[in-house]
Image: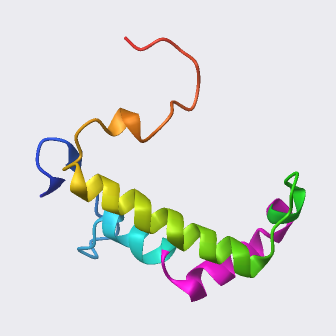
Amino acid sequence: MPVISDRLFRVEYDGNGKNIFDVQYENWTDTEWLFDFFTEFKRDLEAVDAPISLKRAIKLTIDDADRLFELLNENDGANLSTFFKPLDKRKKW
């Protein structure tokens, strides 16, 4: 069953009935999940040019997730390429 008809489809894992779109939003806005995630990958937070605290990383992630999912829902999935950059510079076919 699509999340956004004809544009963004849901993916379910392990037959749990939850789509990854919802799971990602729940994770990226859950302070406990983010605390565990950033604790596990604390070296990454410290390795950036301007390291940020765990608390700040959690707040920024929640703010970014809220904005991203709001934009996706407001635009009904149209023009997803305007929200995401390609992971590499290969030409599109």
Whether residue 21 is in magenta: the answer is no
Q: What count of labels does the image hold?
A: 0
Write the residue at 39% across / 35% down: 82
Residue 10 at least partly seen:
no
Residue 92 at least partly seen:
yes
What colour scheme does the image use? rainbow
Write the residue at 81% across / 68% down: 52
Q: Position of residue 60 (x, y in %)?
A: 61, 69
Please identify the quarter of the rendering in which residue 81 is found.
Answer: top left
Question: Is most of the magenta stretch helix, strand or loop?
Answer: helix
Q: Position of residue 16 (x, y in %)?
A: 28, 76
Please identify the quarter of the rendering in which residue 46 is found.
Answer: bottom right
On the rendered image, what quadrant is the C terminus found in? Answer: top left
Asked if residue 81 lies left or right of residue 9, the reply is right
Please identify the quarter of the rendering in which residue 42 is found.
Answer: bottom right
Write the residue at 50% across / 83% down: 30
Whether residue 31 is in magenta: the answer is yes
Write the residue at 50% across / 34% down: 85
Q: Nearer the viewer, residue 42 or 81?
A: 81
Q: Position of residue 26 (x, y in %)?
A: 41, 77
Q: Which residues are magenta?
A: 29-44
Asked if residue 55 lies left or right of residue 32, the reply is right
On the rendered image, what quadrant is the N terminus found in? Answer: bottom left
The single residue placed furthest to the bottom in the displayed view is: 32
Q: Position of residue 8 (x, y in %)?
A: 23, 47
Asked if residue 49 lies left or right of residue 20, the reply is right
Q: Nearer the viewer, residue 61 or 20?
A: 61
